[in-house]
Amino acid sequence: MQEISDTRYLARSVAGLKPSGIRKFFDIAATMKDVISLGIGEPDFTTPEPILDAGMRSLRNGQTHYTSNSGKLDVRQAVVDNLKRLYGVSYDPVNEVVITVGVSEALYLVMTALLDPGDEVIIPTPCFVSYQAEVILAGGVPVEIPSRMEDNFQMDPERIRAAITPRTKVIFVGYPNNPTGAVATHQVLKQVAEMAIEHDLIIVSDEIYDRLVYDFAHVCVPALGDEIRKRTILLGGLSKAYAMTGWRIGYACGPADIIKGMVRIHQYTIMSAPTTAQDAALEALNNGEKHVQQMVAEFDRRRRLIFNGLNRLGLTTFEPRGAFYAFPRIAASGMDDETFAEKLLQEERVAVVPGNAFGLGGDGFVRCSYATSYEKLEEALRRMEKFMNRYG
């Protein structure tokens, strides 16, 4: 039998996708010893013990079967209760919420449910690497609108307006931002939301980092007004704030008709999110607030260390106000971001991600995650200082 060993049989949309720039350097670092990884956006905390206990109780009680396609109703109710408590926005847990396998699945579902071939999605960049990829896989066209450090990496409403065409269907919003750590102001989000109303567009808002903000109040997009809520799909999850990345629990909230379409796809691809993880999520949502606050306080301590440390080394860094990333400009090294990341990894065993992995506007920067221990960050900065003494 002839072996198929080339890419002729792959769909063009798949064959044309470039590998994730995050995973590339993570995979290289995994083959090396004594590497301090500032590459992966994953809390170094173990899931808090009461949440672990809830998951184990679920297993011991025999909760090993499928749930409703939309997720357990008590979990959906807990999501709704939290959004109401935090942001004053209301959803119907029966018809306007679906529990997903992380925000990654929610992103896949919403793009697949909304986009016809050729539909355009406006995406402020730099941004998380999956946004453009999921648009392409759904048959859509990502339209990147780069932001600038000089503007605090705020998206520019006028540039977004100029990018709207008859084929535009979605404006994508992702704040607090990965990779820059930027947060979006109420004023900017309101302008973008009103633009969506004016042009009859959908807003997809990824707010996975909503609880990880520092000296700032997160602005929840659907809470900006009822007309905005009616055309916004809110994506969120428990991975970051509750240190539950491996549990894979996310959610989407939005208008019933769109959520219904997303659930239809979810039925055929996933069936339901893991039952054990849903039971753990219920404990997190109902009783996990003190653990969130403890982790946020520690992230804030690390944030100040890395922000001050990078600037001291001549790596000009915007002060991150959310998530757990710093995004320094590396011009002082005289290198482009790919070369900087490769040399830093090989010579000093510190892994960072080149900014160009995150779309337009990322060239000349690298992403440094401070979701690792304070002591490792101190050592990473010492190694980077030696590196910059050679090249800076």
Image: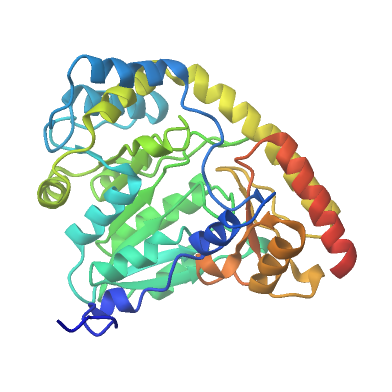
The quadrant of the picture occupied by the N terminus is bottom left
Residue 176, how many percent across, how many down?
51, 46
Residue drawn 57% across the image and 27% down it: 295
Residue reaching furthest to the right: 389
Q: Locate residue 359 relative to residue 285 in the image: left or right.
A: right
Residue drawn 50% across the image and 49% down it: 187
Q: Locate residue 327 relative to residue 220 in the image: left or right.
A: right
Residue 83, how many percent across, how many down?
35, 30
Residue drawn 17% across the image and 70% down it: 116
Residue 40, how many percent across, how many down?
54, 50
Is residue 59 positioned above or below 1 on the image?
Answer: above
Q: Locate residue 281 relative to residue 214 in the image: left or right.
A: left
Residue reaching furthest to the front: 1
Residue drawn 35% across the image and 35% down it: 247
Is residue 138 positioned above or below 183 on the image?
Answer: below
Residue 191, how many percent across, how many down?
43, 55
